[in-house]
């Protein structure tokens, strides 16, 4: 896990998960362009029990996925519950970070105290809007200019859907805490 940031209620981390460890129902929802090969994590040794004799001891390249994990300590479990419900309700809307599930970690410290962390597994977005816009050089080629504005209008279209949103009998009116996905797919 690579720590990305800490907020008032949660820590955000980037995780790499090998393709073979991703449940099939989640894999089916993931875009092919999200698969990549990590130079360290994406190599695994081949073992006698699983492969033909001629592959013993070789390295195989394994595809990985990047995900974001939001982790909440005990003091913020109520916030975790609300955010998980919100992500479940809105993650199928194009332009919003997809929700893939949750998991709970229990860790015991040296005093024997058990600490529980609740985690939400989300689609990884590599940029927020500020970072995306700052990273853009002034565009000069017509096709790049058109592409940029089409992508930016998609953000506006997504925001418009939140004005009076109703999802699975939950009604969201006015301001909603949004997680927009800005990546190379924006």
Image (cartoon, rainbow, N blue to C red):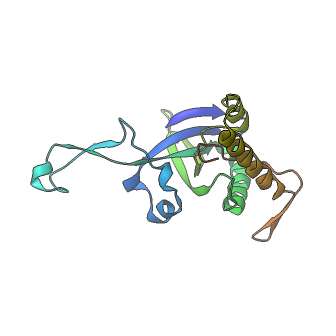
Q: Position of residue 59 (x, y in %)?
A: 23, 42
Residue farthest to the front? 142
Residue 61, x across and y down, in percent:
30, 45
Count of numbered badges drawn on the protein: 0
Q: Position of residue 112 (x, y in %)?
A: 50, 38
Mark yes or no: residue 179 visible. no
Residue 29, above or below 3: below
Q: Is residue 52 left or right of residue 44?
A: left
Snapshot quadrant of residue 23: bottom left
Residue 157 is situated, as x and y percent measured from the top left of the image, at: 79, 55
- Locate residue 76: give its quadrant: top right
Would you place residue 32 above or below residue 6 in this image? Answer: below
**166 displayed left or right of 85:** right
User: In this orientation, which residue lies closer to the viewer: 106 or 185?
Assistant: 185
Residue that sits furthest to the left in the current view: 53
**Is 28 on the left-hand or right-hand side of 156?**
left
Outermost residue to the right: 174
Q: Looking at the image, which is closer to me, 8 or 16?
A: 16
Residue at left 82%, top 51%?
A: 176
Q: Can see residue 115?
A: yes
The residue lying at 68 percent from left, 35 percent from top is: 132
In the image, is residue 164 above or below residue 57?
A: below
Q: Which residue is drawn at 18% across and 43% down?
A: 58
């Amino acid at each position: 896990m690579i720590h990305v940031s800490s907020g008032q209620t949660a820590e955000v981390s980037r995780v790499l998960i090998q393709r073979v460890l991703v449940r099939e129902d989640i894999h089916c929802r993931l875009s092919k362009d999200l698969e990549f090969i990590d130079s360290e994590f994406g190599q695994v040794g081949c073992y006698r029990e699983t492969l033909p004799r001629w592959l013993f001891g070789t390295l195989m390249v394994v595809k990985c996925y990047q995900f974001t994990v939001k982790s909440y300590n005990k003091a913020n479990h109520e916030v975790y519950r609300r955010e998980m419900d919100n992500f479940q309700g809105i993650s199928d809307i194009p332009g919003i970070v997809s929700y893939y599930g949750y998991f709970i970690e229990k860790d015991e410290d040296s005093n024997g105290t058990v600490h529980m962390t609740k985690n939400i597994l989300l689609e990884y977005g590599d940029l927020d809007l500020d970072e995306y816009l700052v990273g853009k050089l002034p565009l000069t080629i017509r096709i790049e200019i058109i592409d940029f504005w089409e992508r930016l209008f998609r953000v506006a279209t997504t925001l418009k859907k939140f004005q009076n949103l109703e999802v699975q009998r939950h009604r969201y009116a006015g301001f909603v805490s949004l997680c927009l996905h800005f990546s190379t797919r924006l």
